[in-house]
Image (cartoon, grey):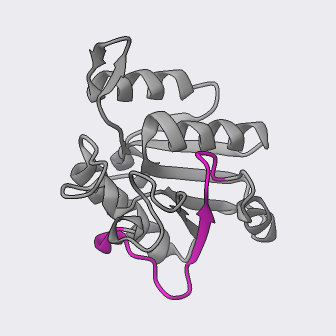
Amino acid sequence: MKNTALLLIDIQKDYFPGGRNPLVGVEAAAENTRAALEFFRKKGLPLFFVKHIAEPGSSFFSPGTEGVEICERLRPLAAERIIEKHAPDSFYRTELQAALKEKEIKTLVVCGMMTHMCVDTTVRSAASLDYDVILLADCCATKDLLWKDEPIPAVLVQKTYLASLDGTFAKVMNSADFLGF
């Protein structure tokens, strides 16, 4: 686990029931993420929260709204780092790369929201920056999509994105396998 960090992407209130953009499977993903977070905390391993802040007046993650906050059950401790971003890629115009270099991180264990957007984009960027990436599949959530008036169920979106990342950009596995339960 040396040189390994946990990266928690956009686990914010707007993605939960009652938020402005609720996701399918978000509660289960948050619970699984909590186990990973507790594991990293107990081991004293580095971890980084990424928080998306959209433009004022955006449909979700609007600055100053309750929905932009990280969900309570995964709230960062005072000493834990929060990286703010304004685009899907957690590396784009953020301090994430510098923070990871400072800690000499080589492997990223990734959890987060939305699988088809910010998780996918960040995992691909991490791989292109030569990080080894482990994506915890059951610690991610997405939503139903629509393509040319045809609905695509979230479960299919999730499987498609995980399959496309596995083996090329990341090692995709469930949290229980990673944590050794």
Horizontal side of residue 93 vs 167, given as left or right: right
Is 79 contained in the magenta span?
Answer: yes
Q: Residue furthest bottom?
A: 78
Residue 31: image quadrant is bottom left
Residue 175 drawn at (x, y percent): 37, 48
Q: Residue at x 75, y 70 (%)?
A: 103
Residue at screen point 44% across, 38% down: 115
Give percent across and percent down for residue 109: 55, 52
Please indicate whether residue 158 sits to the left or right of residue 89 in the image. Answer: left
| 71 shown above or below 92 | below
Residue sitting nearer the eye, 158 or 6:
158
Visible in this render: residue 46? Answer: no
Q: Is residue 112 visible?
A: yes
Residue interval drawn in magenta = 71-90
Most distant residue in the front direction = 57
Query: Residue 43: horizontal and vertical position, in percent?
Result: 51, 74
The answer to whether residue 36 is magenta is no
Q: Quadrant of residue 166?
A: top right
Q: Quadrant of residue 99?
A: bottom right
Q: How many numbered discs, if any?
A: 0
Camera-nearest residue between 80 and 118: 118
Vertical comparison of 166 with 133: above or below: above
**The N terminus sits in image quarter:** bottom right
* Left or right: 123 as drawn, with respect to 21: right
Q: What residue lies at 38% left-to-right and 62% top-to-bottom? A: 12
